[in-house]
Amino acid sequence: MQALTLTLFAVTYAGMATGGLPGLQVDRAGIAIVAAIVLFAAGALGHTGIAEVIDFPTLGVLFGLMVLSAQFATSGFYDWCSSRIAQAPGSPARLLVVTVVIAGGLSAVLANDVVVFAMTPLLCRGLGARGLDPRPFLIALAAAANAGSAATIIGNPQNILIGQIGHLDFWRFVAVCGIPALTSLTIVVLVVWWVWRHRWFVPPREEACLPPLVNRRQAGKAAAATAILVVLLATPLPHESSVLLVAGALLLSRTVMSRDLLSRVDWPLLALFAGLFVVNGALTTTGAPARAIAFLAEVHLLPTALAVMTPLALVASNTVGNVPTVILLLAVWPQAPTGALYALALLSTLAGNLFLPGSLANLITAERAASVGYRLGFADHARCGVPITLLSMGIAVPWLWWNGILPPG
């Protein structure tokens, strides 16, 4: 059984790194689910062990935030934001600032993946019709979504998991991670402007860009729900209860069908989480993680210092991805100190800007742009992503040290 578990674990995380398996049309979520099914059928965890290793509160928070974001999407709010960016008067540099502010702000309180998914197509069409190259704005959109999401425990999937496992306080998290996140947004503007400063314009395309219709009542409802959620997250009520109560209230609507909201939930992402919980849970039964943690502690290589946590976050986030990395690390290291959790959340998120495959938000932006005829390539992204990430982490690491969150070595 140990051999099967270790083999499936290796195959699963190889699939996380490559995005699929050779010769098969299966993505990361599919790989995780198939591995979990095989482990379940083989009895690696027993029939009751599956429920014990899946972190249902984390899945509940993710689901609830997706419903909240779906409320914004059905109201036309995301389309309105994209249209406002593309049609705003002023220079390309001004549009760049507006893109970063909107993407970063929305991603701090809504799932960053949903923000870029909804905004990318209309933003591409609007900029293309205006004769502006969408690529720098797409890079800024994804990078700002990542950076903005680093500010809160509800900004992205890995922060949600870390917040749940560590029982982190919402406002304490903002105090620790908010300043580096805001600084990173400034870095995004400056780097993208510098790299693209002489290459903003392209021949305009004839795009059908109809003004988006916004249901102000539904958008107002979504905004009110977000405000209520932020208040609830500051109370002793468990985070999952706060988020699910807000989501449940949104599903009870006279005008919006609940199936319309549920159809916008990212079910593959929830499946990815569930599958990885099972794979990592099975791994812990082999004893290998406990032995590995004991060895790392003996040689002083646990990520309890910035000298270890920083390269770990940078390399792992850009190979297997920041979400799988966080799920794995918390599964094999359940007693991680609070300071390490803050550092892991901030650094793994900022590290996702390095290369195009570094975060789901990057990949979603590229895929959605391709669906409307615009290509964002690896090299285009890396010219901005590398300096953005190195500068952002170059500020975040001293900040964490100076505030006593994690020692340097």
Image (spheres, grey):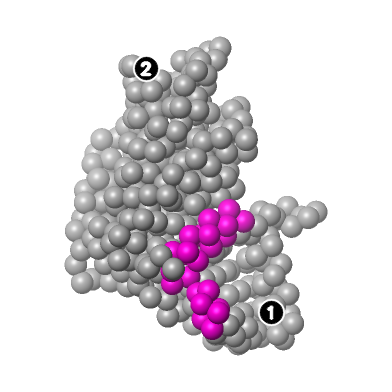
Give residue 296's position: percent from left, percent from top.
Answer: 55, 78
Q: Amino acid at mark 2?
A: Ser
Give residue 187's position: percent from left, percent from top.
Answer: 39, 38
**From what the image shows, is residue 120 above or below residue 205?**
below
Residue lying farthest to the front in this orientation: 409
Residue range (magenta)? 296-319
Give residue 335's position: percent from left, percent from top.
Answer: 42, 80
The earlier-in-sequence mark between 2 and 1 is 1
**In this rendering, does residue 45 appear at all?**
no
- Is 68 a magenta residue? no
Q: Secondary structure at mark 2?
A: loop
Q: Residue at x 30, y 60 (%)?
A: 402
Taking depth in this image into account, of 175 and 62 the one nearest to the observer is: 175
Q: Label 2: which residue? A: 91
- Is 312 a magenta residue? yes
Mark 1 Cα within 10 Å, few/some/many (few <14, many 20+)? many
Q: Residue at x 27, y 57 (%)?
A: 174
Q: Label 1: which residue? A: 5
Locate the C terminus and report the quarter of the image it occupies: bottom left
Distance in Å between CA atoms under marks 2 and 1: 56 Å
Q: Residue at x 68, y 54 (%)?
A: 18
Q: Amino acid at mark 1?
A: Thr
Q: Residue at x 57, y 57 (%)?
A: 315
| Prevailing secondary structure class for the magenta stretch in the rendered image | helix
